[in-house]
Image: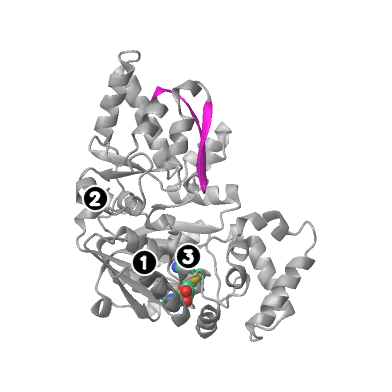
């Protein structure tokens, strides 16, 4: 059972007493939290055909920004770029933490605003090229009103990065929420409800769904009380299946560009080997295939997507000679170069990042590609370099076909993004707030 109704005052009260995620501004001195939806090459790849630099000045909204993870990562990347960021959240306590984190880093490219998403409008805020709204709209009494308001401030060709809860993967969470609701009143003070939650978790039967699936939900372990409250005690909490997600976007005048995390989990081919079942699946629409994949998986607990306005020109980059492949920041590139060393030729090595895992053969193609991902080489240069290095040992077209297939697989797994070579001279090197492992 999901918790619904108009309890927005209680939602706000919860985030005032327990800002989420729990963050100490002093930690900004020692690390940068990086959030997958907000990596600029990824945004450029999925929504701007690899040409995000053409949006100038770049206007970014972080809606329901909480304590500022996405905001700080975006603002750091945009520190030396012609860009303007707006942060919006209804919790003053969360806003204060986000503001202190930005101040600690000396970021002065952010406008802070306290208020509710459903009131945002173009007259007051203007239009945005990129909107981040992660983990927020499923806590609104009327998510349609919230998402429609965001759609109204989306610039032509702009993109929204959205995360909402996924229903089936949260099955155990909703059982625990029902248990807490049975044992306590919704208007009891939060600390008393937290005690009920902790004691209830301790008393669960050994084979309870929660114990079988706890690894899917890390908030209560990573963020202490704030995480526990966010998981089990939010006064408004709803979740979407894949078809419900599509329907919701459609009602709000938006279209799905693509899933942005755990992408292979939305592909039925990740589960189905049997050819008659595969034939049935091939006859389904993209939406039905993804709906089936969600049910094959059973464990998707969040849907993370990029979406665009209906009829928008926003589009995903395609491979071509002038595109530069950029690795996902979650990949350990130095390790890839070590693992895909020619001395391991003929063996398989694992390439992984949260939500994606591939086993790939070590061969001259994978070895050359992983060595070339320095944010400067474009696909044309990589192809000609590979042909040169193989010095006629394999036909050119065979080498380039193999390279194309490897790149396609890595892109599909969300491990590689394609950006136009003009991104480099224009801003790519200025947006990277950490040294490139292959190109320091
Ligand atoms: C789970 S936190 C997510 C924070 C952040 N987006 C992140 O991913 O780290 C949800 C945030 O949404 C904010 N929020 C909830 N409803 C809102 C609304 N109607 N308008 C603005 N902010 C809202 C809460 O105050 C809270 O900071």
Q: Nearer the viewer, residue 27 or 79?
A: 27
Image location (x, y in percent) of residue 371: 37, 32
Taking the magenta stretch, the answer to whether it contains residue 391 is: no
Q: Secondary structure at mark 2?
A: loop
Disc 1 and disc 3: Cα gap in Å? Answer: 10 Å
The magenta segment: 348-364
Image location (x, y in percent) of residue 413: 45, 42
Q: Quadrant of the C terminus?
A: top left
Disc 3 and disc 2: Cα gap in Å? Answer: 33 Å
Q: Nearer the viewer, residue 308 or 427?
A: 427
Q: Answer yes or no: do the residues labelled 1 and 3 have beta carbons within 8 Å?
A: no
Label 1 environment density (alpha carbons within 10 Å; few <14, some 14–19, many ≥20): some
Q: Which residue corresponds to mark 1?
A: 105
Q: Which residue corresponds to mark 2?
A: 51
Q: Secondary structure at mark 1?
A: loop
Q: Is mark 1 within 8 Å of ligand 1?
A: no
Image location (x, y in percent) of residue 149: 35, 74
- Earlier in the chain: of badge 1 and badge 3, it is 3
Label 2 environment density (alpha carbons within 10 Å; few <14, some 14–19, many ≥20): many
In which quarter of the view is residue 239 placed?
Answer: bottom right
Q: Secondary structure at mark 3?
A: helix
């Amino acid at each position: 059972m999901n918790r619904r109704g108009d309890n927005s005052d209680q939602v706000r009260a919860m985030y005032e007493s327990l800002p989420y995620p729990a963050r100490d501004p002093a930690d900004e001195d020692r690390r940068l939290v990086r959030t997958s939806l907000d990596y600029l090459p990824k945004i450029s790849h999925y929504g701007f055909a690899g040409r995000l630099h053409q949006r100038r000045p770049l206007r970014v909204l972080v809606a329901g920004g909480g304590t500022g993870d996405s905001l700080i990562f975006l603002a750091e990347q945009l520190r030396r770029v012609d860009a303007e960021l707006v942060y919006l959240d209804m919790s003053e306590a969360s806003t204060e933490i986000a503001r202190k984190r930005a101040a600690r880093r000396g970021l002065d490219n952010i406008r802070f605003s306290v208020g509710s998403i459903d009131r945002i409008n173009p007259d007051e805020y203007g239009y945005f090229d990129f909107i981040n709204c992660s983990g927020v709209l499923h806590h609104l009494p009327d998510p349609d009103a919230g998402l429609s308001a965001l759609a109204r401030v989306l610039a032509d060709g702009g993109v929204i990065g959205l995360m909402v809860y996924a229903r089936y993967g949260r099955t155990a969470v909703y059982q625990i929420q029902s248990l807490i609701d049975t044992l306590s009143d919704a208007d009891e003070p939060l600390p008393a409800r937290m005690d009920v939650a902790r004691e209830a978790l301790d008393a669960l039967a050994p084979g309870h769904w929660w114990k079988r699936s706890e690894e899917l939900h890390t908030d209560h372990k990573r963020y202490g009380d704030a995480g526990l409250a966010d998981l089990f005690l939010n006064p408004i909490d709803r979740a979407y299946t894949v078809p419900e997600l599509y329907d919701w976007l459609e009602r709000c005048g938006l279209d799905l560009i693509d899933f942005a995390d755990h992408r292979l989990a939305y592909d039925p081919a990740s589960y189905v080997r049997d050819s008659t079942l595969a034939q049935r699946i091939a006859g389904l629409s993209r939406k039905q295939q993804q709906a089936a994949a969600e049910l094959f998986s059973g464990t998707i607990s969040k849907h993370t997507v990029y979406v665009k306005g209906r009829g928008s020109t926003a589009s995903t980059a395609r491979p071509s000679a002038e595109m530069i492949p950029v690795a996902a920041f979650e990949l350990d590139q130095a390790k890839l170069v070590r693992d895909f060393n020619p001395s391991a030729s003929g063996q398989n090595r694992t390439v992984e990042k949260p939500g994606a895992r591939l086993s790939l053969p070590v061969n001259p193609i994978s070895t050359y590609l992983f060595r070339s991902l320095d944010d400067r080489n474009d696909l044309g240069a990589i192809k000609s370099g590979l042909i040169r290095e193989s010095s006629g040992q394999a036909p050119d077209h065979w080498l380039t076909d193999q390279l194309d297939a490897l790149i396609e697989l890595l892109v599909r797994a969300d491990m590689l993004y394609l950006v136009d070579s003009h991104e480099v001279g224009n801003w790519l090197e200025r947006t990277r707030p950490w040294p490139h492992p292959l190109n320091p």
